[in-house]
Amino acid sequence: MRVGIVMGSDTDLPIMAEAAKVLRDMEIEYEVRIISAHRTPEEAAEYARTARSRGLEVIIAGAGGAAHLAGSLAACTTIPVLCVPMPTTSLDGLDSLYSIVQMPGGVPVATLAIGRPGAKNAGLLAAQILGLKDEAIRRRVEENRIRMKENVLAKDRRLREIGIEAYLQKKNQEKKR
């Protein structure tokens, strides 16, 4: 495995699955674990301490509320830790975001957007990191960027062809399916 995806609760799994999907699409091996910084602190520390020896090169951590998981993992390893702040019921993830961006100097954690966009970007950032020394992954990252560009340009052409009202009507019909 090259990337570890870790979260403190199975309630985070639907969001963190976005990172797994990106890694799968990029043909990057990953593992997914549920390990809590608060409820299983010894296991969290062991996971991080043994990450490199198990072949991990990047850890993606979903962290909610106090957001301790990412920081706890980063404290026990020198491989990059990417944090996805989890949306919470009380503050919609702002509490998670504010907590993780306050990591003290010396123990870096890269922080992404809250929720699904952050999980997707964490997968992409992990691929970019691995692509620094793996040419095949770098090419897949570049091909993904080209596909995104082509998709936007195709949408722009379609919008200009049929106009805003027809375009919006078509988008609404697609949402209902």
Image: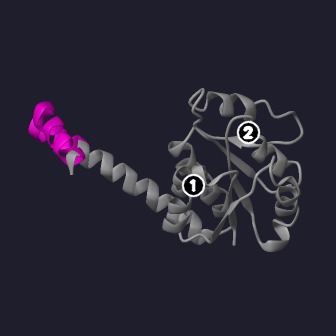
Q: Position of residue 106 (x, y in %)?
A: 89, 39
> Does the segment drawn in magenta span residue 173?
yes
Q: Position of residue 81 (x, y in %)?
A: 75, 51
Q: CA distance from mark 1 to mark 2?
A: 16 Å
- Camera-nearest residue between 134 and 172: 172
Proximity of marks 1 and 2: CB atoms separated by less than 8 Å: no
Q: What is the image's colouring? A: one colour
- Camera-nearest residue between 173 and 165: 173
Residue shown at the point (67%, 62%) measured from the top left = 130
Badge 2 density bin: few <14, some 14–19, many ≥20, Cα 10 Å = many
Pick whichever of labels 1 and 2 is earlier in the sequence. Answer: 1
Residue shown at the point (52%, 53%) measured from the top left = 14
Which secondary structure lies at badge 2?
Answer: loop
Q: Viewed as shown, does residue 140 lie left or right of 84?
A: left
> Does the segment drawn in magenta span residue 46?
no
> Is the residue 138 above or below the residue 55 in the image?
above
Q: Position of residue 38 (x, y in %)?
A: 81, 46
Q: Which residue is mark 1?
A: 13
Q: Viewed as shown, does residue 134 lie left or right of 103?
A: left
Which secondary structure lies at badge 1?
Answer: helix
Q: Which residue is mark 2?
A: 67
- Camera-nearest residue between 55 and 85: 85
> Label 2 sits on what residue type?
Ala
Residue 157, quarter of the rendered image = top left
> Label 1 sits on what residue type?
Leu
Residue shown at the point (76%, 46%) measured from the top left = 70
Which residues make up the magenta segment?
Answer: 156-175
Residue shown at the point (57%, 71%) measured from the top left = 136
